[in-house]
Image: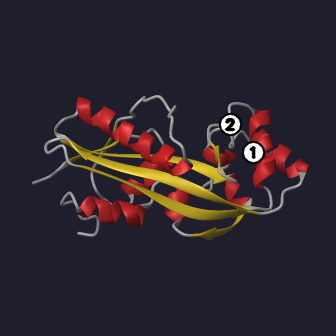
Amino acid sequence: MTRRIILASASPGRSELLRRTGIVFEVVPSDCGEETEAATPEEHVRELALRKARAVSQRHLDALVIAADSVAELDGDILGKPDTADGARLMLGRLSGRFHRLLTGLAIVDGPTGKTYDGIESTLVHMRELSSAEIDAYVRSGEPLDKSGSYELQGLGATIIDRIEGDFANVVGLPMAHLARAMARFGVHLLT
């Protein structure tokens, strides 16, 4: 039996990672609000991922829905998506020359059974020391806007990240090894 699978995300990076597995899926963004009352960055991403998966599952009861939410975390602060170029400059200045964590909440909801899964993947990322001229040039590229932590690893941001400890795919937006283990719980095996 072929399962209907939905990725509840408009992220091109997440879609591309999932597409590379060869499974057939649809993209249905959740359009959920991103505010939470979570006490920690881990609770924040877990809550949002589950909210997104449930919202899409309620509209597509026949599908297995995958959702994710990612943030950069530094010194206990969530560095989400900057609203402005100045916000991106501030974030990049804080991250410059330091390690931070990229956290992704992963959630799966099986519409037919109501079964759910949620978990968190954490990857340590080091940004090389950036000059103010480099930060300005990167911000002018437009890439940091609308990206968690103000960078995108699959683009020009690859020039500013010099070390990753953990799941590379997590930094792109979808922890694939974690996803493969979680999908197996629902009878979907990404390697077969």
At a point 74% along the width and 40% down the height, the residue shown is 88
* Tally of marks: 2
Horizontal side of 175 relative to 125 (left or right) equals left
Residue that label 2 marks: 82
Indicate the secondary structure of the residue bearing disc 1: helix
Residue that label 1 marks: 91
The span from disc 2 to disc 1 (Cα, nearest Å) is: 8 Å
Looking at the image, the residue that sits furthest to the front is: 39
When the figure is inspected, residue 29 is found, relative to residue 104, above or below; the finding is: above
Q: Residue 26 sits in which quadrant?
A: top left
Numbered tag placed on residue 156 in the rendering: none
Label 2, residues with CA under 10 Å away: few <14, some 14-19, many ≥20:
many
Q: Three-letter amino acid code at disc 1?
A: Met
Indicate the secondary structure of the residue bearing disc 2: loop
Q: Position of residue 192 (x, y in %)?
A: 23, 69
At a point 68% along the width and 36% down the height, the residue shown is 82
Color style of the picture: secondary structure
Q: Residue 62 sits in which quadrant?
A: top left
Q: Position of residue 122 (x, y in %)?
A: 53, 61
Q: Three-letter amino acid code at disc 2?
A: Pro
Label 1, residues with CA under 10 Å away: few <14, some 14-19, many ≥20:
many
At a point 33% along the width and 40% down the height, the residue shown is 53
At a point 26% along the width and 45% down the height, the residue shown is 109
- Asked if disc 2 and disc 1 are in contact, CB closer than 8 Å, the reply is yes
**Foreground residue among 123 and 14:** 123
